[in-house]
C-alpha cells in the first residue's frame, strides 16, 4: 500500500502478497470491500486456510504503478493461504501499459512462507490467541528450498538495482 501512495518509495518486494486493496481508497475515509476479510474453511477436518475471491469487477487493485515503483513479486504456486490463481487474476486488472513495472516470479512447490534460504519449511502452524486454528501454508520441501534460494538472490539484485545508492 505504501508503494501505491508514497512517491518516495522507489522499489519494493512482495512475497506472496496481494496487490488487491482490502479497502477502497476514498481520501481519508477507507471502507472494507465486500467479502473481506477472507473466510476460513476446513481442509481434511484438521487444517484451516483462508479463501479469497477477488474476481469481481468491484474489487480495487492497489495502483502500485502510480509512481513508477519497481516491484518484484515472489509467488508460491503451492500457497494454500493465498493461491497463485488470485495473483494471476489481480495481474489482469493492472493496466497493460503499466505491467512492466512489476516482475512476477512463480515458484512451483513453494508454500506461502518463503523465508530466507536454509530455513525449514513451515507447512502449517497454530495461530493462537485471536484465531485458535491450525493454518495451512502449503509447500513441498524441495520446491520450497529452491524458491528460498532463488528468490533471495533475486530480492538482493532487485533492491541493489532500483534503490538509490547512499554514501556512508
Image (cartoon, rainbow, N blue to C red):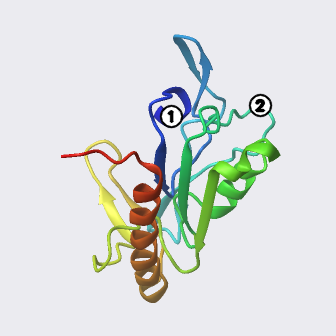
Residue 61 appears at what percent x and percent y? 67, 37
For disc 1, the neighbor class at 10 Å (few under 14, some 14 to 19, many from 20) is few
Closer to the camera, 102 or 75? Answer: 102
Q: Which mark is residue 126?
A: none
Q: Furthest residue to the front?
A: 167
Q: In the figure, residue 46 lies in which quadrant?
A: bottom left
**Secondary element at image label 2:** loop
Query: Where is 51 relative to 152, above or below?
Result: above
For disc 2, the neighbor class at 10 Å (few under 14, some 14 to 19, many from 20) is few
Q: In the figure, residue 141 lies in which quadrant?
A: bottom left
Q: CA distance from mark 2 to mark 1?
A: 18 Å
Closer to the camera, 56 or 73? Answer: 73
Q: Is residue 24 visible?
A: yes
Question: Residue at image x 46%, y 68%?
Answer: 154
Query: Where is 68 relative to 80, above or below?
Result: above
Q: Name the residue tied to disc 1.
A: 1
Q: Furthest residue to the top?
A: 28
Q: Which mark is residue 58?
A: 2
Number of marks present in the image shown:
2
Residue 30 appears at what percent x and percent y? 55, 17
Labelled pair 2, 1 in contact (Cβ < 8 Å):
no
Question: Residue at image x 66%, y 30%?
Answer: 34
Q: Is residue 136 visible?
A: no
Lower position in the chain sequence, tag 2 or tag 1: 1
Residue 128 appears at what percent x and percent y? 27, 51
Query: Where is 73 relative to 31, above or below?
Result: below
Closer to the camera, 101 or 79? Answer: 101
Please identify, in this view, whether the residue under mark 2 or under mark 1 is nearer the observer: 1
115 sits left or right of 94 in the view: left
Residue 44 appears at what percent x and percent y? 52, 72
Question: Residue at image x 38%, y 64%?
Answer: 156
Amino acid at each position: 500500500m505504501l508503494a501505491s501512495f508514497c512517491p518516495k518509495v522507489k522499489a519494493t518486494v512482495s512475497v506472496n502478497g496481494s496487490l488487491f486493496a482490502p479497502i477502497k481508497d476514498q481520501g481519508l475515509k477507507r471502507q472494507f470491500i465486500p467479502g473481506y476479510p477472507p473466510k476460513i474453511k476446513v481442509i481434511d477436518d484438521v487444517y484451516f486456510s483462508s479463501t479469497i475471491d477477488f474476481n469481481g469487477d468491484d474489487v480495487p487493485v492497489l495502483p502500485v504503478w502510480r509512481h513508477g515503483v519497481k516491484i518484484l513479486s515472489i509467488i508460491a504456486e503451492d500457497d494454500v493461504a493465498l493461491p497463485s490463481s488470485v495473483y494471476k487474476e489481480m495481474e489482469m486488472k493492472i493496466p497493460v501499459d503499466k505491467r512492466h513495472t512489476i516482475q512476477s516470479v512463480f515458484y512451483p512447490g513453494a508454500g506461502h512462507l518463503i523465508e530466507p534460504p536454509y530455513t525449514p519449511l513451515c507447512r502449517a502452524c497454530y495461530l493462537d490467541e485471536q484465531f485458535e486454528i491450525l493454518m495451512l501454508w502449503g509447500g513441498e520441501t524441495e520446491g520450497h528450498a529452491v524458491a528460498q534460494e532463488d528468490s533471495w538472490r533475486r530480492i538482493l539484485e532487485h533492491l541493489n538495482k532500483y534503490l538509490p545508492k547512499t554514501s556512508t
